[in-house]
């Protein structure tokens, strides 16, 4: 048989072909599995090495940045049992938390002891290859990890309003309207929520347990979206007060499914880069504030609530409050060391309508009020002298205006347009027409310095900054400055007697209306003409990862 015949025979003989194909496929599959095993081993080793670098960087004191860093890091490596890990470089330098500088350029190596406030640690490790050595002839692969840490003076502060003096009935109605359910909270339950202070990082821990986020940094946990019901349930998990936890659990069961991102409520700043929680040094905020803010944010960019009130001498008293969620642009609490972090309350509109009886018949009294955002920023932390340690905030009051007048309630949600306020028609009978206007504008929102001592921080003291022309009673001030337009529509109508009658009615109902307005605004965390601030925590020389 010639050579061409032999090739034709081999080409036509298919016996054993499937075995060859299977053997080749099996070899490829084994190779892929081997590669996956090595890749997984490298990933786990890389993650462990990065954790070791982070821990080493944060364990160093300011004095270690210049001398002694190597000894501290080596001890940590030995304690961790990572004997194959070596120190590649230890680079002292200066870190500047300047938002105008690109993050990668904020750390600069330095040999000037007076400028050194941070350190860069670079570690490396040789990871054994199980199957890769067959393909590469290398028994291991070298991996590296780096971390930059500094020591920072941090303060956590809030811009909101305490619930004290608000009507429990109105507060409950406000929360129920926000959540579109009936919470049916009693006065004692609202007081319990207001007194309970919940550790914010414990909320993060609770979310990590609920959603299998162990090992994630607090920033990772806070930057996820959660159903508001799950978030309120995490508040309950984090509460150390069993009564408050039970109230929050019940609220979670009734809450909706609106999405909330915890970082929109609480900005942890540099503190969020860690997964370490020092339970002995908690960062706390009132349970009521967390519940209210979560329900507000779950509605989206704006929230709307409607409250009906029964009051002596008044009928059909209804108030609508619409707020632009400040948390879209500014959280309600922040942990910061920089001056460029500004907290803002949301712009808020309220529209109240009530009916009062009078000698000339029923009077319809509409009041419209608008609040501009208040502001607070961190201007200084003093840690050098213990006797004078404290925090200074620059605060601007929430100014605004109020009117006796009518507006289009369907346009309250549109904050891009100014509201048109028309004269209010208080009464119209067969004989008389009574129209009224009254305007109150607050000015003077220049920033003012507010200082908190360490004792005031520990006591969670609230301080207020008011507009220079703040008035104690909005409705009373409007009533005393009301301009009436009384017109006779029929023969024999006595218009001269109308003005004192209407004025007396407005003066009588004004205190009740002021109480309603104040309670609703406090329930929403704002006040007209006032900004309320508190410093929740101050920490000096806190180790933070910055790279």
Image (tube, rainbow, N blue to C red):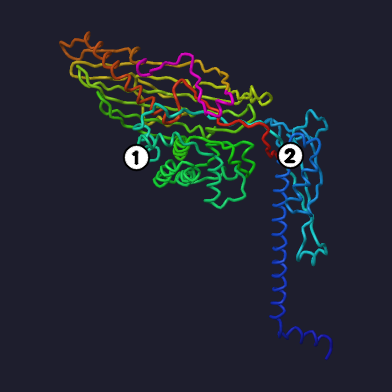
Mark closer to the observer (1, 2): 2
The question of residue 462 being in magenta is answered with: yes
Residue 525, above or below 208: above
- Report the residue that reaches farthest toward the top: 496
Q: Looking at the rendered structure, which numbered label has been put on residue 60? A: 2
Camera-side residue: 135 or 233?
A: 233
Q: Position of residue 428 (x, y in %)?
A: 23, 20
Residue extent of the magenta highlight: 452-477
What's the residue at 32%, 12% (across, down)? 483
- Which residue is label 1 attached to? 184
Label 1 – label 2 distance at C-alpha = 52 Å
Q: Position of residue 77 (x, y in %)?
A: 76, 49
Q: Position of residue 43 (x, y in %)?
A: 70, 56
Q: What is the count of numbered marks?
A: 2
What's the residue at 30%, 22% (across, down)? 365
For label 1, the crowd category at 10 Å Cα-Cα, with few meaning under 14, some 14 to 19 and many 20 or more, is few
- Report the residue that reaches farthest toward the bottom: 1
* Labels 1 and 2: the sequence-earlier one: 2
The secondary element bearing badge 2 is classed as loop
């Amino acid at each position: 048989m010639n050579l061409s015949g032999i090739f034709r025979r081999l080409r036509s003989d298919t016996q054993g072909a499937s075995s060859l194909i299977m053997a080749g496929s099996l070899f490829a599959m084994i190779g892929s599995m081997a590669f996956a095993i090595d890749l997984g081993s490298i990933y786990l080793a890389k993650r462990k090495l990065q954790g070791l670098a982070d821990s080493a960087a944060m364990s160093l004191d300011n004095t270690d940045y210049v001398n002694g860093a190597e000894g501290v890091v080596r001890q940590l490596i030995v304690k961790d049992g990572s004997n194959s890990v070596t120190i590649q470089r230890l680079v002292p330098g200066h870190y500047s938390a300047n938002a105008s500088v690109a993050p990668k350029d904020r750390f600069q190596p330095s040999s000037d002891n007076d400028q050194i406030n941070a350190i860069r640690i670079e570690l490396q490790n040789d990871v054994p290859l199980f199957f890769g050595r067959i393909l590469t002839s290398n028994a291991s692969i070298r991996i590296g990890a780096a971390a930059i840490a500094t020591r920072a003076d941090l303060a956590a502060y809030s811009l909101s309003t305490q619930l004290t003096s608000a009507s429990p009935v109105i507060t409950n109605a406000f929360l129920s309207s926000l959540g579109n359910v009936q919470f049916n909270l009693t006065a004692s339950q609202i007081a319990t929520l207001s007194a309970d202070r919940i550790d914010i990082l414990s909320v993060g821990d609770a979310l990590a347990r609920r959603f299998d986020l162990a090992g994630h940094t607090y920033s990772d946990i806070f930057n996820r979206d959660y159903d508001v019901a799950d978030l309120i349930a995490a508040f309950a998990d984090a509460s150390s007060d069993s009564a408050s936890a039970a109230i929050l659990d019940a609220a979670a069961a009734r809450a909706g499914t609106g999405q909330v991102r915890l970082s929109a409520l609480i900005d942890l700043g540099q503190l969020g880069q860690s997964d370490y929680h020092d339970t002995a040094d908690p960062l706390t905020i009132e349970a009521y504030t967390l519940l209210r803010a979560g329900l507000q944010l779950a509605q989206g960019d704006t929230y709307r609530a409607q409250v009906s009130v029964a009051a002596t001498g008044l009928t059909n008293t209804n108030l609508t409050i619409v707020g632009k969620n400040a948390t879209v642009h500014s959280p309600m609490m922040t942990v910061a060391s920089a001056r460029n972090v500004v907290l803002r309350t949301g712009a808020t509109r309220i529209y109240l309508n009530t009916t009062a009886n009078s000698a000339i018949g029923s009077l319809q009294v509409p009041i419209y009020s608008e609040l501009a955002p208040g502001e607070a920023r961190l201007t200084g932390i003093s840690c050098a002298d213990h006797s004078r340690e404290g925090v200074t905030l620059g605060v601007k009051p929430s100014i605004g205006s109020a009117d006796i007048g009518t507006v289009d309630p369907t346009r309250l949600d549109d904050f891009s347009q100014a509201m048109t306020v028309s004269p209010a028609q208080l009464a119209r009978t067969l004989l008389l027409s009574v129209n009224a206007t009254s305007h109150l504008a607050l000015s003077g929102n220049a920033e003012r310095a507010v200082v908190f001592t360490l004792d005031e921080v520990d006591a969670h003291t609230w301080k207020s900054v008011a507009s220079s022309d703040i008035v104690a009673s909005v409705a009373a001030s409007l009533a005393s400055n009301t301009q009436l337009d009384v017109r006779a529509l029929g023969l024999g109508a006595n218009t001269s007697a109308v003005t004192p009658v209407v004025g007396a009615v407005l003066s009588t109902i004004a205190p009740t209306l002021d109480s309603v307005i104040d309670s609703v605004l406090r329930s929403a965390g704002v006040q007209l003409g006032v900004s309320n601030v508190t410093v929740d925590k101050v920490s000096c020389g806190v180790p933070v990862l910055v790279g």
